[in-house]
Image (cartoon, rainbow, N blue to C red):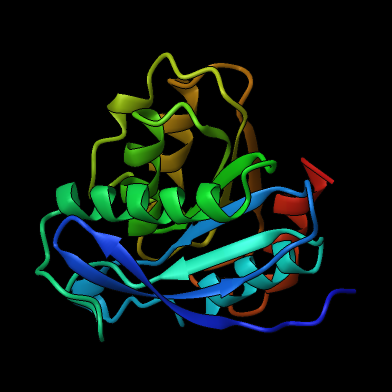
């Protein structure tokens, strides 16, 4: 199992500098950006769910980049309703590609991070695989994902207290059949007692 050494780095975003943590990976293994939940509700790259998503992929030898959206902690800029935040994701992808030119680029997001992350990925063909954890489909429109044929893994808690599970199901029914949808019985939005179940769902589809 790889050791965990998170390098503190600064990304060049369109609104200024972005604070980030980077774990180098093994040559040729995927390089993945992990996007954090809503900045106005305490979301940061140190969120527990984001940490365990990142750790799960680090344990597989992947290069992993977590970063703070604009206006969060030491990241410059201001909240931009998800529009500018998707540009922040592009900056993170640029860094990963520059530092892992032979690795496939993947993207994962938790809650709001799924919106900003998938919105960026939809416009960036470099992203080969996507992961949506507790996607906030009740707060943001994900219609932009219509017609996307890349692999997408969605993980949702049946007892999610923030994003109604039924609304996630409704969104999944609008998506192509290539989407892998995992529903975790008893899990809430932050997967407090189901973190290992959540990370297993992510890894089982690709490792």
Give x and y (percent) for residue 123.
34, 29
Q: Is residue 160 left or right of residue 201?
A: left
Can you tell which quarter of the image residue 142 is in?
top left
Can the viewer see residue 133? Answer: no
Instruction: Compare residues 138 and 91 and report the one nearer the observer.
Output: 91
Above-or-below relation of 125 to 12: above
Give x and y (percent) for residue 143.
29, 26
Can you tell which quarter of the image residue 10 is in?
bottom left
Above-or-below relation of 171 to 18: above
* Residue positioned 62% across, 68% down in the render: 54
Give x and y (percent) for residue 149.
54, 17
Above-or-below relation of 158 to 6: above
* Residue positioned 40% across, 67% down in the render: 36
| Residue at the limit of the structure toward the right, as seen here | 1
Instruction: Compare residues 192 and 14 and report the one nearer the observer.
Output: 14
Above-or-below relation of 93 to 57: above
Instruction: Compare residues 43 and 92 and report the one nearer the observer.
Output: 92
* Residue positioned 53% across, 47% down in the render: 97
Give x and y (percent) for residue 126.
50, 32
Image quarter hosting the N terminus? bottom right
* Residue positioned 66% across, 78% down in the render: 193
Can the viewer see residue 75? Answer: yes
Tally the marks.
0
């Amino acid at each position: 199992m790889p050791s965990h050494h998170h390098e503190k780095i600064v990304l060049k975003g369109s609104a200024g500098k972005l604070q980030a943590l980077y774990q180098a990976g093994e040559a040729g293994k995927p390089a993945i950006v992990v996007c954090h939940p809503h900045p106005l509700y305490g979301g940061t790259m140190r969120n527990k769910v984001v940490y365990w998503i990142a750790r799960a992929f680090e344990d597989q030898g992947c290069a992993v980049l977590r970063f703070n959206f604009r206006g969060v902690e030491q990241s410059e800029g201001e909240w931009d309703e998800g529009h500018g935040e998707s540009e922040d994701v592009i900056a993170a992808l640029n860094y990963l590609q520059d530092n892992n030119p032979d690795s496939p680029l993947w993207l994962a997001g938790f809650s709001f991070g799924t919106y900003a992350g998938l919105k960026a990925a939809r416009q960036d063909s470099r992203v080969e695989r996507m992961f949506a954890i507790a996607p906030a489909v009740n707060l943001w429109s994900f219609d932009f994902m219509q017609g996307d044929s890349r692999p997408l893994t969605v993980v949702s808690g049946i007892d999610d207290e923030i994003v109604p599970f039924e609304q996630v199901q409704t969104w999944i029914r609008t998506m192509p059949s290539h989407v892998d949808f995992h529903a975790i019985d008893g899990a809430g939005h932050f997967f407090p007692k189901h973190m290992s179940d959540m990370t297993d769902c992510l890894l089982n589809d690709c490792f």
